[in-house]
Amino acid sequence: MTKPLAVITGASAGIGAAIARALSAAGHPLLLTARRVDRLRELDLPDTVCRQNDVADVEGFRAAVSEAEEVHGPVDLLVNNAGWLNLAAFKDQEPEHWQGMFETNVVGLLNTTSVVFAPMLERRAGTIINIGSTAGHRYGPNHVVYVGTKFAVRGLTEGLRAEAAGRGVRVVLISPGLVDTELLSRSTQVDLIEAYQANKDRLQGGLRPDDVAGAVVFAYQQPPEITVRELIIAPTGSG
């Protein structure tokens, strides 16, 4: 039996790419979106539609979903993975950094979810997995705005789950601790980046993207009558 379509945002590297590989290995056709479409194509996964999209562009995402559904049927899984971290003390951050994090981490998640949520409710089937962060549970130094976005993701996940309750749609939050990814690539304060790297080295590099991908697959592959509401994973040494 052909497995249903899974959609992953921010799939060009790190956690998103690892999730794409894991779901492809499990036999799912995929729609992968990211700003860097060339990196999506380099994954070279079968039965995969790759489209350039910034999650701020809801109509572009809608068009990509429609195209993939024509080939592979309705979306059964959306993984909201696209994210942006700009590490800085709040007093040193520029407004465009606050806006960028909220537009990607919060508004972008709402954009993509809005495209698939109502159709899932109508079919009474589907799963939405939001990639949060332990930053959505507690503050970390120089993470004021990022923490705000991830608390928002946590709250939105709770609300969406309540709205979907009894209607066949699962909404899941997976909150990783420190992961060895490119997420910090937009930060520019060298001293903070070095401190972040030192902490990552202390934790033997932190979680691997494949660790988070495994959590996504675990949550998704539960029987449809079971929802893993929230899963927090972190390096054991992080305390």
Image (cartoon, rainbow, N blue to C red):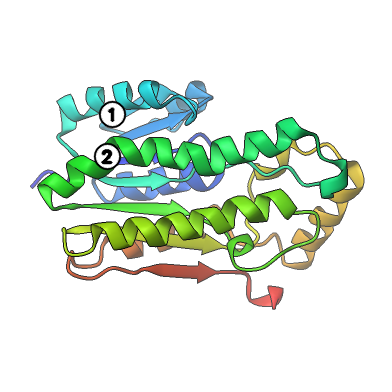
Residue occupying image coordinates x 63% and y 61%: 135
> Closest to the observer: 208 or 234?
234
- Binning the other alpha carbons within 10 Å of mark 2 as few (below 14), some (14 to 19) or many (20 upward) gives many
- In the rendered view, does 37 fall on the left or right side of 178? left
Quadrant including the C terminus? bottom right
Which one is nearer the viewer's eye here, 120 or 32?
120
Q: Nearer the viewer, mark 1 or mark 2?
A: 2
Q: Position of residue 67 (x, y in %)?
A: 24, 22
Whole-number angstrom distance, CA of label 1 to CA of label 2: 9 Å
Closer to the camera in the image, 5 or 27: 5
Q: Which residue is mark 1?
A: 65
Residue 21 falls in image quadrant:
top left
> In terms of secondary structure, where does tag 1 sit?
helix
Looking at marks 1 and 2 on the same chain, the residue that comes earlier in the sequence is marked by 1
Q: Amino acid at mark 1?
A: Val
Q: Is residue 142 visible?
A: yes
The location of residue 179, given as percent across then percent down, is 62, 56
- The residue depicted at 77 percent of the width and 47 percent of the height is 87
Q: Residues within 10 Å of mark 1 (few under 14, many from 20)?
A: many
Residue ID for mark 2: 116
> In x, y percent, where is residue 92?
87, 42
Q: Are marks 1 and 2 in contact (CB under 8 Å)?
A: yes
Q: Amino acid at mark 2?
A: Val
Q: Is residue 98 above or below residue 150?
A: above
Badge 2 element: helix
Residue at the (58%, 55%) spot, across then down: 150
Can residue 193 be seen by looking at this rendering?
A: no
**Residue 103: quadrant of the picture:** top right
